Image (spheres, rainbow, N blue to C red):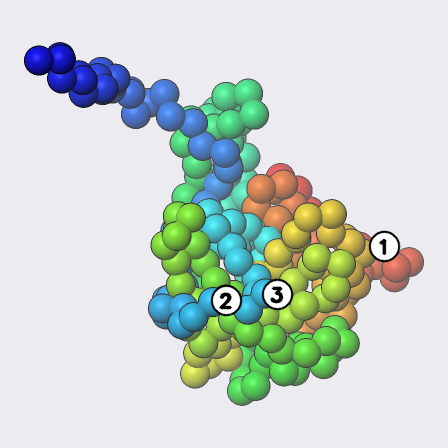
Amino acid sequence: MPDEPSSPSRPPAQTVDPKSILFSLPTISDDLPELEQVQGRPEPDVLILHEDDWTQLEFFAKERLAEIERMLREFKPFEAANRAGAAWKKPFVRKISRQPVVRGSKVPERLANLVGSKVAVAPIVMSAPSVGGRVKNGFTIPLGGNVTLYGCEDNTGIPVLGASLGRDPVDHNLVEAFARLNATEGLILVDWRQQLVLTGVEADGNIGAWQP
């Protein structure tokens, strides 16, 4: 009888030291939004975020500037100590006490009017290539040029208002939206990865910024 074909051998199992695993981002948020199951195929133009990108760029009420500055002062030496080339040994976990960024009802519609846009469907947050959900009570406000505002509502207003920059974004669209939201709602814009806060618009029209 002919010899039976041998089953393919599996490669030997390997172990990895957890300390050797590097992270692609220097900081991540401790809180994620409540998600709902996505029904059917997502809309072709829906904003899809990886969970690590949640609120990497976000707005706060200007009353929280001192608190944000303290966090960035803590983050700066941590980020430097954990940098490993283009990656990080571990990320700085931001623990934010969520308070209304803007108070009131129908806030997304109000903000959309301020920036000359309309409210669109809630974003989808992914934790893996096939695992995720739609942000409950969420919304997006497209600004054009692959720039989108996003967030979620509750009974006080909106506790989260973030910004997403897609591929080849028109950065000016975000700067212009910031200027309007700062002037009308008193909002500041924090870029956690760049350790940068846009604080307002100066009398000469330049954007005021702060870094630790």
Is label 2 in a helix, a strand or a loop? loop
Q: Position of residue 68 (x, y in %)?
A: 54, 52
Q: Residue at x 51, y 49 (%)?
A: 53
Asked if labels 1 and 3 touch by Cβ distance under 8 angstroms, the answer is: no
Q: CA distance from mark 2 to mark 1?
A: 39 Å
Of circles 3 and 1, which is in front?
Answer: 3
Does the image show residue 58?
yes
Looking at the image, the residue that sits furthest to the bottom is 105
Q: CA distance from mark 3 to mark 2?
A: 8 Å
Q: Position of residue 40 (x, y in %)?
A: 43, 70
Q: Residue at x 45, y 58 (%)?
A: 125
Q: Dividing the picture into quarters, in which one does residue 111 lie?
A: bottom right
Is label 1 in a helix, a strand or a loop? loop
Query: In which quadrant is the C terminus drawn?
Result: top right
Q: Which residue is mark 2?
A: 42
Q: Label 1 is placed on what type of residue?
A: Asn
Q: Which residue is mark 1?
A: 206
Q: CA distance from mark 3 to mark 1?
A: 33 Å
Of circles 2 and 1, which is in front?
Answer: 2
Residue 45, label in figure: 3
Q: Is residue 150 left or right of residue 20?
A: right
Is label 3 in a helix, a strand or a loop? loop
